[in-house]
Amino acid sequence: MNLERAQLGLLAALAATIPVSIFASQLLLWLSIAVLVARLAARRARLVRTPLDTPLVALVVWSLLAASFAQDPVLSHESSKKLVLYALFYVGVLALERPDGRERVLSSVLLGGLALAGLMVAQHLFLGYDRLDRRPSGFLGHYMSASGVTMAVLLLAVARLALGPRARPRLVDLRLPAMVLAGVAAVAAATLAGQGVVATRLCVAGLAALGAAVALSDRKAARAAEAALPLVTAPLAAWALVVSQTRSAWVGAALGLAVIAVLRAPRLLWLLGAAAAAVVLLRPAGVTSRLTILDESSRDRYYMWQAGIDMVLDKPVFGQGPGMILAAYPRYRWPEAPNPRQPHLHNNLLQVAAERGLPGLAFFLWWVVAAFAGALVEARRGPSEDPGAVWAAGGVLGALAAVFVAGLFEYNLGDSEVLMLFLLLTAVPFALRPARAAAA
């Protein structure tokens, strides 16, 4: 196997495991980085300049400076190791240039997302994860992480169905999603029997293998995955998102669906309006009970945001330092806040400003705006010689918008799973550019 195929297989395996395992996805990221370095050393690849390079480097450098000026620099630098994850953007840009590779890696995201959504639904129906204080988290450690990833997966699946080339799956094409759901059922059954850890590890390994197999398989098998996976994943991910009872993910998903509707046909926005009206009229208990800003969780967010503003005003240049909010919060906590300690501020913008100062926030916003601009430009190009580019760019734009808006109420980019998926999707529009230039 040559280095290019190894890179593609590793990235697809990584994409399939992001929704189910931090350890597996980060291990695969390190292997992908090693292969990328080998490709660069052998002059089999070259780094592509993108509009994200300058803000990304500035954000990394400023984050390390902020850590150096933190109250506990050692601890803050230790927390900064997550910056390594940003290398995934460059791995993705190089590995996703070819249309068939891009389609297969995005199919692998749906593969892992289907497993996550399936286990969340199984937990809700059979394992007692049906209360507000016990929400389904699937394979991940927290329900917020699970809902954030599921939200992005839902939007990718919907974009593939709404904007992608028409593909009618045959019955035989459903074998792949059936295999995934069989593995999920085995994990749920093993959990009831007290053997969930072993079953989960086997399922994660199987998903990594399936992702790599989809990426390296022949075109016929890959087309079958592309046709069947979004058709099964979309409704199951929507179901999982509802039972997660996570309001920020609901808001993000609604905006992402609106973005995809506008790209497909603006009149489809009426369908979203009709769905919202149906919720208001039917008032399903599991949904309407969460549509409030008067609960303790909302109150706590208000007071932690106030504390975050005070942190920024107190240290506007370098902030408190990455990873230092937990230690700093008691000094800035308002007396009315329900909880005495907070590990983060439930808002991406405020979190970045409080940790890394206003310059850090400026670099972060520069990076986000450049990412959105790249996705928007590609999504508006319309049909081309690469029909898959339309749905890929549209799905990425919807998912990025959803993650950003949900991040106004939750520090979702603090979750490695959401951040890695965000970085992988961000790479897609910038991988389209050199591929289009080569075709011209």
Image (cartoon, rainbow, N blue to C red):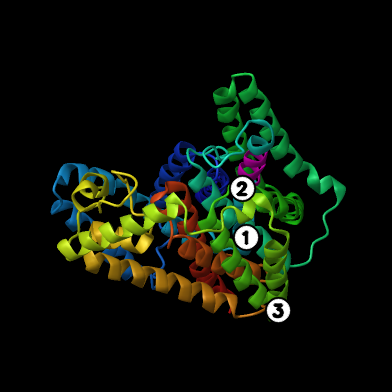
Q: Is residue 117 magenta?
A: yes
Quadrant location, the N terminus: top right
Q: Residue at x 59, y 59 (%)?
A: 102
- State the residue position of label 3: 265
Q: Nearer the viewer, residue 344 or 391?
A: 344
Q: Position of residue 18 (x, y in %)?
A: 52, 46
Task: Give the structural element (helix, strand or loop) at label 2.
Answer: helix
Q: Amino acid at mark 3?
A: Ala
- Residues packed near mark 3 inside 10 Å, few (<14), some (14 to 19) or many (20 plus): few
Disc 2/disc 3 C-alpha distance (Å): 26 Å
Q: Is residue 214 above or below residue 382?
A: above
Q: Which numbered circle lies on residue 113?
A: 2
Q: How far is disc 2 from disc 1 in space, using C-alphas? A: 10 Å
Horizontal side, residue 344 vs residue 139: left or right = left
The mark found on residue 156 in the picture is 1
Asked whether 119 or 37 is in front, the reply is: 119
**Which span is picked out in magenta?**
114-121
- Left/right placement of residue 85 relative to residue 72 reads right
Tag 2–tag 1 contact (CB < 8 Å): yes
Q: Is residue 207 above or below residue 70?
A: above
Which comes before the other along the chain, label 2 or label 3?
2
Q: Position of residue 283 (x, y in %)?
A: 69, 58
| Type of the residue with mark 1 | Leu
